[in-house]
Image (cartoon, rainbow, N blue to C red):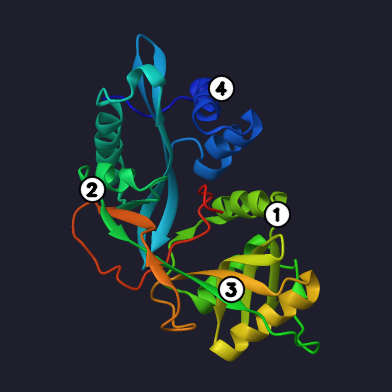
Amino acid sequence: MDCLARREEFPALAQLFVDSFGGTLQFARTVLEEFAGEGNVFTARQDGVCTALLCAVPVTLRGRKGVYYYGLTTRPDQRGSGVMTALMDAAGEELARRGAAFAVLIPANAPLFAFYAKRGFEKAFSKRVLHRSVRNNLWAQAEFDTVTVKGLQALRQKYVPEAVELDAKGYTAVLTDLYSMGVTSLCTDHGYGLFFKKGSEMRFVELFAYSDHAAELLLEAARQKTGAESAVLELGESQTLFLGEGAPRDYGMIRFFGQHFDVQDAYMRLMLDDEE
């Protein structure tokens, strides 16, 4: 099955992306051309028409090359026909030939966990969600909105070396999208975070620190900037911050192309998924 998308098919695939997920054609083209990149976009065809889309974004995990499946969709008249299953199988074979050791993805809703499980994926990368009130500490300080692509890569390597890592183009797409949606970054010498302000509450989509106390100081600095008195924290299930608090939730999945390896303590977030 010839499933590698050709450059001239990108406009039609961008339209399929918008029809399926909403957003703009500009964002869809960014996904295809920058986040995934030419050579990493796969499609199925019927009578010369692109009927399905799968982006295989380059990532690494624990020294192994892999891909992040993103934007998986089919035309409405092809849903339930097995087209996506065939495309995933064909793309997986091609990616394994290239040396990919795994594929990861984030199901968009709960029923899709079962769908992907039937296609060789296993649950992984659970997250822990907790609510905390934030103390008013007038002395809490941090640097805000200074995290760049290189900066985020360096922070990830420092605080969470077991993360699924995008390449520079992937991180550029993610940070551009986050900042366009109003994310605020903050960092100190002892930790960093990324959060959105939702009314009187802050939602941290990423938070790492050397200790609970260092994390609390980050939250308190964020309160000084925003005035928000409480925060929702989305942490990797294996993170040691605020142990015993919050409830675990299924988040990502992984499929191994060949030999399995341990991903129990691995972390995956900020992947341009809908939950950001």
Q: Residue furthest top?
A: 47
On residue 17, which mark appears? none
Bin the neighbour count of mark 4 within 10 Å (Cα to Cα): few under 14, some 14-19, many 20 and up. Answer: some
**Do the residues bearing badges 2 and 1 touch, measured as CB atoms within 8 Å?**
no
Q: Position of residue 138 (x, y in %)?
A: 81, 87
In front: label 4 or label 2: 2
In front: label 1 or label 3: 1
Occupied quadrant, residue 84: top left
Q: Residue at x 25, y 30 (%)?
A: 86
On residue 117, which mark appears? 2
The Cα atoms of the two marked residues, 1 and 4, are separated by 26 Å
Q: Secondary structure at mark 3?
A: helix
Q: Nearer the viewer, residue 19 or 198?
A: 198
Classify residue 213 as left or right of residue 85: right
The Cα atoms of the two marked residues, 4 and 3, are separated by 36 Å
The residue where tag 3 is placed is 155
At label 1, the amino acid type is Tyr
Q: Secondary structure at mark 2?
A: helix
The Cα atoms of the two marked residues, 4 and 2, are separated by 31 Å
Bin the neighbour count of mark 1 within 10 Å (Cα to Cα): few under 14, some 14-19, many 20 and up. Answer: some
Q: Nearer the viewer, residue 20 or 15?
A: 20
Q: Residue at x 63, y 75 (%)?
A: 192
Bin the neighbour count of mark 2 within 10 Å (Cα to Cα): few under 14, some 14-19, many 20 and up. Answer: some
Instruction: Say which label, 2 or 1, has the lower sequence index.
Output: 2
The residue where tag 1 is placed is 179
In front: label 1 or label 4: 1
On residue 11, which mark appears? 4
